[in-house]
Image (cartoon, rainbow, N blue to C red):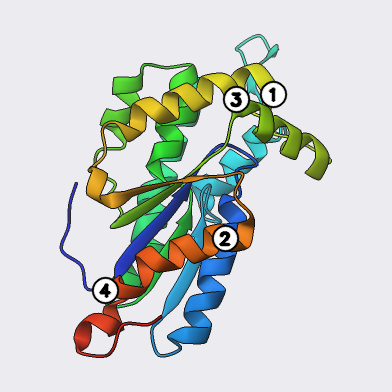
Amino acid sequence: MNVSRKGLFIVFEGLDGAGTTTQTRLLAARLAQRTPTVMTAATAEPSTGPAGSVIRQVLRHRVRGTDCFGKDKPFDPGALALLFAADRLDHYSCEIEPVLDSGGVAISDRYKLSSLAYQALDVPFEWIASINSLAPEPDLLFFLDVSPEVAWNRVSMNRITRDIFEVPEILRQVHANYNKALERMDRDKVVIIPGETPADSIADIVWHHVAGRIPAAQGGQEPVN
């Protein structure tokens, strides 16, 4: 779904450990420094909203399903996919759209490509695409491309606890789903960056693509270098 907007909506995507959170933070900091008059909001999915809070508990094994006989069972993957879709619409409506309407820059650490990559492990890919079809497309998506092996090494080294998707065999499937999902996107809106590049260098590549598209720069001011 494409919508008319005043601001700029940017998304970072990639495997767990690819560096999406780092790049979201670095871009938000650079925008705040170089374009202080432009509102900037850095967000993430799952969001901090009601559906997002439940999702985080499911991913950390804090919430499980229980059948009618009281027997524990894994949380239904279709229900989890629907929670992600619901959280995404709520996230966009409450945290992203108001910033864009004001002419600002909204940055999201993950968006609907993550659902196509992760939730499609357990339920049909096209169904995932369908339930997320109402979520507006970003103006610019950065995909930080790391191999499943590199992602696994980073996750293993840097996190004490891991969620249900952070195991090697699943990361390989997720990587394949990401490639499938990227093929469906408008290539003019996608920038693929090797995720093993140093973080500061990735940040410079990101800024090269963002600077000339900042809403304030489009209003007659000099592009921000």
Viewer-side residue, 36 vs 75: 36
Task: Look at the numbered discs 4 and 2 and tell me whether their residues touch, using CB distance below 8 Å.
Answer: no
Residue 105 coordinates in the image, percent (x, y): 37, 72
Mark 1 vs mark 4: which is more N-terminal?
4
Task: Look at the numbered discs 1 and 3 and tell me whether their residues touch, using CB distance below 8 Å.
Answer: yes
Residue at left offset 26%, top offset 29%: 130
Residue type at tag 1:
Val
Which of discs 1 and 2 lies nearer the camera? The answer is 2
Give how far apart the Cα atoms at labels 1 and 2 are.
28 Å
Residue 33 coordinates in the image, percent (x, y): 53, 85
Give how far apart the Cα atoms at labels 2 and 3 are.
25 Å
Question: On screen, 134 above or below 174?
Answer: below
User: Residue tagged by mark 3?
Assistant: 171
Viewer-side residue, 212 vs 181: 212
Residue 19 coordinates in the image, percent (x, y): 61, 49
Q: Is residue 11 left or right of residue 56?
A: left
Mark 4 surroundings within 10 Å by alpha-carbon count, few (fewer than 14), some (14 through 19), many (20 or more): some
Q: Which mark is residue 167?
A: 1
Which of discs 2 and 3 lies nearer the camera? The answer is 2
Q: Which mark is residue 201?
A: 2
Mark 2 vs mark 3: which is more N-terminal?
3
Give the secondary structure at mark 2.
Answer: helix
Give how far apart the Cα atoms at labels 1 and 4 are.
39 Å
User: Residue tagged by mark 4?
Assistant: 101
Q: Quadrant of the C terminus?
A: bottom left
Residue type at tag 3:
Leu
Question: On screen, 207 above or below 143?
Answer: below
